[in-house]
Amino acid sequence: MVPFKKLSGVAAPLNMINVDTDMIIPKQFLKTIKRTGLGSALFHEMRTRPDGSENPDFVLNRPAYKKTQILVTGANFGCGSSREHAPWALLDFGIKCVIAPSFADIFYNNCFKNGILPITLPQSEIDKLMDNAERGSNAIISVDLEAQEIRGPDGGCIKFEIDPFRKQCLLNGWDDIGLTLRNENKISNFEAKRKREMPWA
């Protein structure tokens, strides 16, 4: 997993509440177990018209937001079915940070496991960031995980809270496998000892 330390860029405003995982990545794209290639299907039903052409009105299709890495959105983001493909699709598109008033628990946990930083803020702070994001390419937002700060284009600073363990995992790029491999020597020593003491096992 790629470490997350600092991120700076244009944030995309998705001013919607209750965005569920089927909206993030529709069910017809869940046939793969690969984490790559899902970015093109992100928000498919909103990004494309019935004829398959691009919907120019959808925020991620607008020129200023096509390469966004930060998404500012509404409450209860990631609700619905517990599909890990949702954070996979966001990350494959390039989104590494989602800022919202609240998240569905399973989606929130899956973000950390896949290198995405989900930030929870009061609605009043979300409103400020949403207003900044609406400015498009003129509004750069910076996210500093180590300092736990978000800085807006006008120099304002918003502090955010995050679980210390999850923070360390993101800063160091540790997913579940990475955490296990930190104990690789202990695991190898245990296996060698067990083989000596129980060769029949």
Image (cartoon, rainbow, N blue to C red):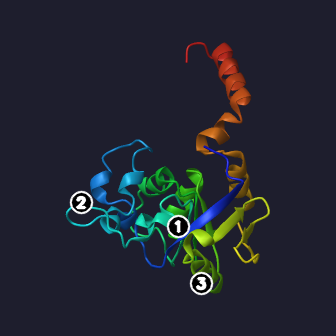
Residue topped by disc 3: 127
Question: Which quadrant does the C terminus fall into?
Answer: top right
Q: Is residue 81 left or right of residue 145?
A: left
Question: Which quadrant does the N terminus fall into?
Answer: top right
Of circles 3 and 2, the one toward us is: 2
Q: What amino acid is labelled 2 in the image?
A: Gly
Location of residue 45 by image quarter: bottom left
Q: Earlier in the sequence, mark 3 or mark 2?
A: 2
Q: Is residue 46 left or right of residue 108?
A: left
CA–CA distance in space, label 3 to label 2: 33 Å
> Which of the two residues, 201 or 186, is positioned nearer the viewer here?
186
The answer to whether residue 86 is above or below residue 99 is above
Q: Position of residue 129 (x, y in %)?
A: 62, 78
Regarding mark 1 in the picture, which secondary structure is present there?
A: helix
Q: Are marks 3 and 1 in contact (CB under 8 Å)?
A: no
The answer to whether residue 196 is above or below residue 50 is above
Q: Is residue 101 left or right of residue 7?
A: left
Q: Position of residue 177 (x, y in %)?
A: 60, 39
Location of residue 8 by image quarter: bottom right
> Which of the two residues, 179 or 158, is positioned nearer the viewer here?
158
Q: What amino acid is labelled 1 in the image?
A: Asp
Q: Earlier in the sequence, mark 2 or mark 1?
A: 2
CA–CA distance in space, label 3 to label 1: 22 Å
Q: Position of residue 155 (x, y in %)?
A: 76, 75
Crowding around mark 3 (Cα neighbors within 10 Å: few <14, some 14 to 19, many 20+) is some
Q: Residue at x 50, y 65 (%)?
A: 65
Q: Residue at x 27, y 55 (%)?
A: 28
Of circles 2 and 1, the one toward us is: 2
Check residue 52 in the rendering and tell me which mark sits there, or answer none: 2
Residue topped by disc 1: 105
